[in-house]
Image: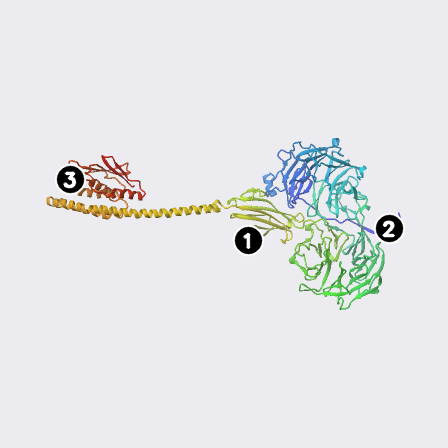
Amino acid sequence: MKRLLPFAAFLLCSMAVQTQTPVFQHRDSRELANVSMTQVFQDSRGWLWFGAKNGLYRFDGMGFLLIGLPEGLEVSPVRAIYEWDGLLWVGFANGTIGFIPVNDPFPHTSFDEFLQKKDPVARLTLWNPEEGLPNAPVTAFMADKSGGFWIATYGEGLYCLKDKRLYQFDSADDGLSGNEIYALACDANGQVWAATDAGISICSMPEPGKKRLRRFSVADGLPDEIITALLADAQGNIWVGTQEQGVHHYNVAKRRFDFQTELWSWGAVSSLALYEKSELWVGTLGNGLVRVELSTGIQHPLPASHPLRFVNTEALCKDREGLLWALLDNGAIYSANVRFGLLETPFGNTQALLRDSRNRLWAGSAEGLFLGVSQGAAAKSAGADNWVFKQILTKPENIISLWESPLDGTIWAGTFGKGVYVISPGGKVLKHLSERDGLFNGNVLSIAGNKKQVWLATLGGVSVIDLEAPQRIRNLTRQSELGTGYVYKVFLDSQGRIWFCTDGNGLIVFENGHYRQIKMANDIPLKRIYCITEDNRGHIWFSSDNDGLFSYNGQHYRQYTLENHLHSEAIIGLAADKNGFIVVAYEDGFDLLNPERIDHIIFCDESIGAPHAEINLNALCRDAQGNVWLGARQGIVRLEAFHEVFLDDPQPGITSVSGSSQNIDFLSVHSFAHDQNYFIFNFTGLWYTDPESVRYRYHLDGFDLAWKVSKDPLTSYPKLPPGNYTFRVQTSEHGNFENVPEASWSFVIRKPFWSEWWFVLLSAMTGGAFFYGFIRNREQRLNRVAQLKRDRVESQFVALKSQINPHFLFNSFNTLITTIEENPKVAVEYVEHLSDFYRSIIAYRERDFISLQEELDLVLNYQFLLKKRFEDGLVLINQLDGKTGLIMPLALQMLVENAVKHNVISASKPLRIELFTELNDYVVVRNNIQPKLKPEPSTHFGLQSIINRYALLGERPVLVEDNAAFFTVKIPLKK
């Protein structure tokens, strides 16, 4: 009873406030009209999947995409979602199980397009094992380390898929604790835990058909008989949620519980979300969400007025960005960036903060000094508030600085104008030091120290107090020490150095018994320094009034300005959490800077789920767990330093590729024909923290000359030429694309076959062959032409020679003399025909062909000359009158001449020469054969010349027939 009296006294003079509350955002969308969600799950690629009473949805931060049910399956609520073996498994209340590949390309479809088509862009596949599906609701899935896949039902116990065969565990045959299973978890040993109304069953199947089961009940130390939730941590230990006894942590290696929520009063546990080694979020039936600090065990329900307080929580999910997703039993979706929490205080503006070694919260304001204690387990009623603040000082002093002594845990509270108060851990004022006690100035802006000394920064300089002799106060006022002016901040680093942020004299450090003034950083003059901190690498961070932020590693300085994406250069506070992140405070919010990534700075405001906070000068502190607390006008902001590493960039992904209005299976197809050269790329940058802030930068290697930046998640490339390409897309939420993740897809547009090397080579060879053939043909043709000319000349020469032969001339002149004597008139006609004959020979000598009638005229002239000589001994039968066509010059004349030359001509045995056509294709010269007793010598040139000339000109061949009765020559007639 005596132990409770101080606590009761504390409550009498204290003020209750609400717990530190994250900003929960109601995720509503027009796609979800009249849709009630039941489950939430994040797959390995980062997509959030929501099970609903009408099916499955995929969420990208901006909209919900409905996944179609298997054909013929009636609508049933989704009760379980899990990823295994590259597939997303979905269990329904009617026992049906469906799946869909996790990496399936999803064609881009807007909600409006979906409403028009009324057809989902993707569809689940129904799982039909040989053993059949359960007839009871599927409540959970789990994969073990041996390749087994476990399926929990509410009514038929547990199933295990091993080597493509399905085995059942039930209560009757296998001793399962109960056939109604709420949840599954896999421990460090690969055993599957099943939560039932009668405790836990720990199951395994090391080999197909070899069942192992161990029951874990209240008799074995289980805190509650009804187990409603299970969750494995990173080490494979199990968190157990119960019906009445809250949450407990089971150490598998030690085989015992090592954590429990004491005095749990928040109802049945429905779901769990773990932030490793930091905090556990518990979903309850009736009391909404409860946050449990794992380092202290303190339980923080949401405020009584919060919309998520007195509700039934259906499911919880922690995503890879650190966001907490909560589903309520009415189907509503909420998310919160639980890294941030706002504690609304009963007093005004928080000007100084300190969380002491006992996890109590000290706050200073213009209204005085307040000590806050989280009631935790002491809050027995479901409606109780979580924090209680007590005003420590009897007078409302204006507190502007706080410090805890590592020597005895006393609290030093600096005031504005009234010096410093030294307060015992129990809240009793031990002493009050002011200017009357030797302080140089009563305005104490900052306090720092160790187990021996305390340093107080005031508006008049720095006062040093020896803890072994606190009555001795030494003021540093000399020019050689800190110079003139006042000090904004005094800071003790991990190496024992004392740093002073001065007003006009830059940064001063006291080390090895000497003061050293730092006036320049990277050639930048340092004058007014407001704040300073140290990160976990030992680097010093400080800010100036006009030049932004600086870091110092002992040798080099690095400056951060607006170009590095600082929110502002008006920095009023700095702190480093246990992970090395630097909190940079401003009057309108704060940045979170990752030193490992120079230009990666996130401004924490309402857009990413942080509370709106107007921070005060140097009103920051770090607690024993490495979390950072910030004092603001709106209250106190907690910035949790989680042990887990969460993503701090949007994650890019190519969701679909299409071309010419057809979707491409880009995961397996990478080669395209030359005319398949129109591509549309759809991509996404999953960033559920603030999806509207995502910007894309993309580049098509092999085509684009520079990167393109856009807010639109798609781009197109028409008429790409053949070549090798890689489409690369990057995402950023702050506009800086240095060292950000990237997604890519490589593909090839093949050349047309006429551009391939083999076709070019073949074409070149073929072209060369054709060229060679052309040259050869040209040469042959030229040779033929030359030969033709020679033959023509020789033919003309022979013809002419035959006509100017002395015998021919002699006979012609004798005939002429005789004719002149007998009939002068006929002689004149004879001369004319002789003249025409020779004139024709000369006229036709350069022509390849003449008309048939021209050749006939020449033959008739020649026949007239011969007729005067042989009279009735020569008979020329002409059937060519009126015939048309072309013939070689002198061809018929030479044949007539050959007939006259080689045959006997007399009146008793006339030589009959016939000229006619055959099928209008040939001119036929035929004579009866009357060989001379003494044959005329022959060169055989005339007939052979005709044959050769027609062959050279590519005409039909000349045909020669000799049947002993007639000698026939057929000459082709050219049309």
Horizontal and vertical percent position of residue 656 = 59, 44
Q: How is the image coloured?
A: rainbow
Q: Secondary structure at mark 3?
A: helix
- The amino acid type of the residue labelled 1 equals Leu
Relative to 776, is 638 on the left or the right?
A: right
Q: Earlier in the sequence, mark 3 or mark 2?
A: 2
Task: Report the Cα–Cα distance between label 1 and label 3.
Answer: 99 Å
Q: Residue at x 46, y 47 (%)?
A: 761
Residue 856 location, quadrant: top left
Residue 69 seen anywhere in this rendered image of the structure: no
Kind of residue sitting beneath label 2: Pro
Q: In the figure, residue 128 lies in which quadrant? A: top right
**Residue 924, percent across and down?**
25, 38
> Which residue is disc 2 drawn over?
6
Observer-side mark, 1 or 3, equals 3
Q: Which residue is mark 3?
A: 871
Whether residues under marks 3 and 2 lie with C-beta atoms below 8 angstroms apart, the answer is no
Sort mark 1 into few (<14), some (14-19) or many (20+) by Cα contacts within 10 Å.
few
Q: Residues within 10 Å of mark 2 (few under 14, many from 20)?
A: few
Q: Nearer the viewer, mark 2 or mark 1?
A: 1
Nearest to viewer (mark 3 / mark 2): 3
SS class, disc 2: helix
Cα distance between the residues tagged 3 and 2: 169 Å
Q: What's the residue type where badge 3 is placed?
A: Glu
Of the residues under marks 2 and 1, which one precedes in the sequence?
Answer: 2
Q: In the shown orientation, is residue 220 left or right of residue 519?
A: right
Q: Looking at the rendered structure, which numbered label has been put on residue 350? A: none
Which residue has dot 1 on it?
Answer: 705
Category of crowding for the residue at label 3, using alpha-carbon neighbours closer than 10 angstroms: few (below 14), some (14–19), many (at least 20): some
